[in-house]
Image (tube, rainbow, N blue to C red):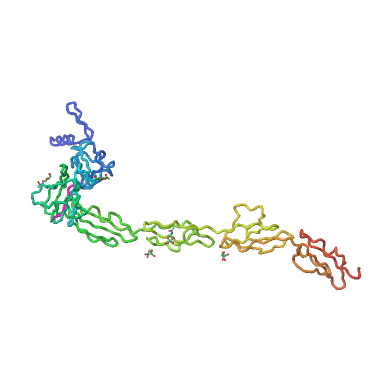
Amino acid sequence: MTQNFNIIWLVILLSPNLRICHAGKDVDKEPPRECKLEGLHPLLIMTYKNVTISVSKKADKITIPHGERVTVRCRELGRYKLVGDPLLVCRNGGWNGKSPSCIPTTSISNYSDNVPPTILFGLPRGSAAIEPSGALAVFPGSILHLECLFARRMGNPEWTWNSTFRQYLTGWAIAPSEKDWKYRLSIYYVKNQDSGVYTCSTPKGLSNSIRIHVVDTHCPTLIPTPAPLSSKIQGARMGQRAEFECPNGYKLVGSKVLNCQYNGRWSSEVPRCELILCPEIVLPNAKLQMLEHNNSVSGNAVFTCLWGNLLLGSQTISCGEDGTWNATVPVCSQIKCPLPPVPKNGIILETERSPPVAQKRFTKANKARKVGSLLRFACLPGHQLIGEGSIICTENGTWSHEPPLCEVRCPYPGDPPHGKIAPLKFWYKPGDTIQVTCSLGYVTPLEPERKPTCRENGIWSGPPPPCTSYRDV
Ligand SMILES: *[C@@H]1O[C@H](CO)[C@@H](O)[C@H](O)[C@H]1NC(C)=O
Ligand SMILES: *[C@@H]1O[C@H](CO)[C@@H](O)[C@H](O)[C@H]1NC(C)=O
Ligand SMILES: *[C@@H]1O[C@H](CO)[C@@H](O)[C@H](O)[C@H]1NC(C)=O
Ligand SMILES: *[C@@H]1O[C@H](CO)[C@@H](O)[C@H](O)[C@H]1NC(C)=O
Ligand SMILES: *[C@@H]1O[C@H](CO)[C@@H](O)[C@H](O)[C@H]1NC(C)=O
Ligand SMILES: *[C@@H]1O[C@H](CO)[C@@H](O)[C@H](O)[C@H]1NC(C)=O
């Protein structure tokens, strides 16, 4: 009974959401605030829980919880000197300690002797990685050159170090291209005891340091990658790298290069190769058809149109390295023949269903006909059709023939009883005359004015003269 009572009290005391009053004093507080990266020097690189980010890039998105610590260093190790605290702790929305910042050194400031010297490093053999604190983690056995950059004409800088293990060779570099600005310290076959702080000081007493941390760190061995991914793996020692590549037609998803980091982890996951495919083509309608559809890189899509249609655009499009087609899908446009003018004194007889169309009844909507359409023509009475009576719309978008003409003609008037007219024709041109030849025993009056003439309006000047019997004359 007593035990249960005690447990309840303990729960109340530990529960952060409960309001507890001590002698009238309200101790209910807001939770401590997080810290933002805004306001930190933009050249800083910050590491929090093994994640390293550049302050300038993601400053507005990331916040650090109260009580957490972050390590900072400057970008471009050795080219900026960190002043202030390299370790920051978030205290209720603010950072403790002296705010860190990065000041430029000689290689940034045109070798002025009013700034600290730049310290660069080179590894003719071995490997190294940068730690979050800005220390250089060096793999044992490496050969390390530390280069203090200073204008030689302004005097000699000086290298000092705090390890007591051995002495190091220092002096101006030998190569003509380097001898006037690189003051070098070399560490051959680096050993654990070489760890320490190496400082270069200028005659004016300005200095910059680099911390060397000799450590035998390995990353997990990378197993040879399955095809199509190919790799060039230097090794799995800290500071070594692996490069990956995909063959043509694939894209690499992930990082192309992996670095074995100070903490024995690869900088990212092994990437993979993804087949590049162009988007599948969906045909917009039945008029457009595909003869070939290969949407892998360098593949082609080949199009054709149904009969009677014209392909507008590229007949062949090609899938590019970037996974896009090199041109848009073509379109099929129905081939049409523009309707010819209606012949003078004629009409157009539509095919099958439509009734005859008179000249003025053509509207915009029926000004063209599709391939294969047939147009038939007819002439008004008293007119002869000259040309083709029907024409067809061809695949060229043109009619098979010119439209016909309707010319004024007099029709064959018919033979008179007991006679024949000459010349005998279906049609007579204006100005043509006809004669009548009567059968044996019949005659026609021989008056010239009674010889019928075809007039300009397609009407005979008179009927054919009659043949009368001798007996009646
Ligand atoms: C950071 O990396 C070190 C070394 O691999 C590891 O021991 C440690 O647990 C990691 N810390 C976090 C927060 O992941
Ligand atoms: C760098 O310094 C040299 C000599 O001090 C001077 O001649 C040159 O103009 C400077 N260059 C720049 C970019 O300031
Ligand atoms: C050198 O200095 C660094 C930083 O002050 C210190 O951590 C390290 O122990 C020193 N090394 C030696 C050998 O004194
Ligand atoms: C598609 O095109 C690619 C590149 O030209 C070729 O290697 C592949 O064999 C083609 N695929 C098919 C199914 O034809
Ligand atoms: C697209 O590729 C095809 C096949 O290689 C080529 O014939 C065509 O000219 C290309 N079109 C364009 C717009 O580049
Ligand atoms: C289309 O036009 C071409 C050239 O003008 C001609 O040679 C061909 O015979 C035409 N085709 C048809 C179906 O009229």
**In the rendered view of the protein, which quadrant contains the N terminus?**
top left
User: Residue 142 placed where, x, y %?
Assistant: 15, 56
User: Residue 45 placed where, x, y %?
Assistant: 23, 45
- Pick the residue in front: 337 or 84: 84
Q: Is residue 20 visible?
A: yes
Is residue 138 a member of the stretch shown in magenta?
Answer: yes
Q: Is residue 47 visible?
A: no
* Side of 468 relative to 95 (left or right): right
* Side of 347 relative to 398 (left or right): right
- Pick the residue in front: 456 or 120: 120
Q: With respect to residue 74, does 24 lie above or below? A: above
User: Residue 444 placed where, x, y %?
Assistant: 86, 68
- Pick the residue in front: 164 or 108: 108
User: Residue 199 placed where, x, y %?
Assistant: 14, 46
| Segment tinted magenta in the rendering | 134-140
Q: Residue furthest bottom?
A: 440
Is residue 443 a member of the stretch shown in magenta?
Answer: no
